[in-house]
Amino acid sequence: MMDVMSNGSALHILPAGPQEDFGWTLGVLVRNYQNSSGAVMGGFPHGARGYQVLVAVAGGELPNQLALAQHLGIDRTVMTYLIDDFVKAGLVERQLNPADRRARIIVATARGGEMLAELQRSMAQVEDVVLAALEPDERKVFRALLSRVACGSPEAAGSELGACEAVEQMLGGGA
Amino acid sequence: MMDVMSNGSALHILPAGPQEDFGWTLGVLVRNYQNSSGAVMGGFPHGARGYQVLVAVAGGELPNQLALAQHLGIDRTVMTYLIDDFVKAGLVERQLNPADRRARIIVATARGGEMLAELQRSMAQVEDVVLAALEPDERKVFRALLSRVACGSPEAAGSELGACEAVEQMLGGGA
DNA sequence: TAAGATCGTCTGTATGACAACGTATGCGGG
DNA sequence: CCCGCATACGTTGTCATACAGACGATCTTA
């Protein structure tokens, strides 16, 4: 237990080399992302997650609240009062779907669109700050790999997201 | 608002290309990691976070509960009942520090060490499953970049972790 | 010794997630 | 048309969890 701080050429627990725990690095990244983004958007309804909801809404691919919730991996009852707050803030609207009057189509208002564009600029800066340890081309590699990890997951593959097509297209056809 | 689903060659909101939102991909990865790891460790005290606590404890670099908590980005009061549960499970011990009798040195018991080694094997498999969309060498690149992102963060730089040294050494001197 | 800071613990509170039920609607069989 | 069943959404209640604040014990400095 005291030979951990010996040379470092051999870890006696995990023979995978001297790299740090994957879960810890992931946690650090997520915390930094949440803290930085929380600092950027002042009174925005639900912080970083609210922003992602607005991004998904503006994407226009998700037909109803349930699809939206599954896309973001949150409970549908949570999505209810999440959308509620967005409606109160005048950022989105619940529209009735004439084809299925049970479902609500969530669309961004003009104010929501402006807010989203503004936040996207701020979030781009946040991402740069969070990834400050990487060179610009390394960030591209990291983002691309992260996108493939997310899009290759069963969660993304199971539902018809339409979001990962662009990535696969970019990675398969382009660079 | 309806031209979003037009050609796709130009996004009128974000001029950064067709890649998916960074926060969303990050969220997908974290969710998969947590779900898969939660499935692996049955009755382990606090899921993936508990595992990371045990990893940090076994590392032996963190002198007391507060350092442990800061390392993992959680509150010190949370760390209290987190360690409590580990003690109840017989995985760690609270030892008095003769140099500072306010602080408690947290050490892993023999049972805790065995459990950790076992879990590390399981977690390695979990990581492979989560990163299944990447080729083996791509996973290495992804892990290395993620480590640098985490270790280059102000959170990691502010405290003397001693954990990122190996990574920097690996990246600076080795490959 | 005395004052202030720090580490750990305890308590209360608030925030958040989830389960269960209810309502409205769509779908299919008689 | 009517009936049972499934789905989408909302509401309520319950529970876990995080965090703020206060406290005792201890270290440090004067």
Image (cartoon, coloured by chain):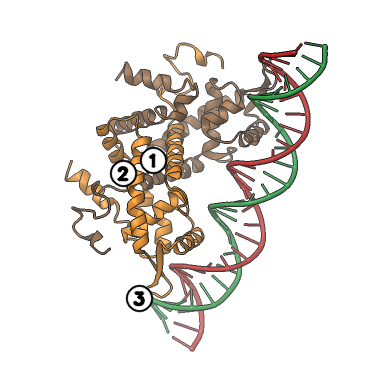
Chain colours: A brown, B orange, C red, D green
Q: Which sits in the foreground, D9 or A106? A: D9
Left or right, A75 with respect to A168, comes to right
Q: Which sits in the foreground, B100 or B13? A: B100
| Image-quadrant location for residue C17 | top right
Label at residue B147: 2
On screen, residue C28 above or below A149: above
Label at residue A130: 1
Which mark's residue is nearer the viewer, 3 or 1? Answer: 3
Could you tell me which chain the residue with mark 3 belongs to?
B
The amino acid type, in three-letter code, at marker 3 is: Ala
| Residue A87 screen position, x and y as percent | 66, 30
| Residue C11 screen position, x and y as percent | 63, 66
Helix, strand or loop under label 1: helix
The amino acid type, in three-letter code, at marker 1 is: Val
Q: Is residue A115 visible?
A: no
The amino acid type, in three-letter code, at marker 2 is: Ser
- Identify the residue shown where x is 59% and y is 21%: A63
Sequence-wise first label, 2 or 3: 3
Label at residue B99: 3
| Image-quadrant location for residue C6 | bottom left
Could you tell me which chain the residue with mark 2 belongs to?
B
| Residue D29 screen position, x and y as percent | 39, 77
How busy is the neighbourhood of tag 2: few (under 14 within 10 Å), some, or many (20 plus)?
Answer: many
| Image-quadrant location for residue A129 | top left
Using the rendered image, report if marks 3 and 1 lie on a common chain.
no
- Identify the residue shown where x is 51% and y is 61%: B81
Q: Which sits in the foreground, A62 or A174? A: A62
Q: Give the Cα distance between marks 1 and 2.
A: 12 Å
Q: Are marks 3 and 1 in contact (CB under 8 Å)?
A: no
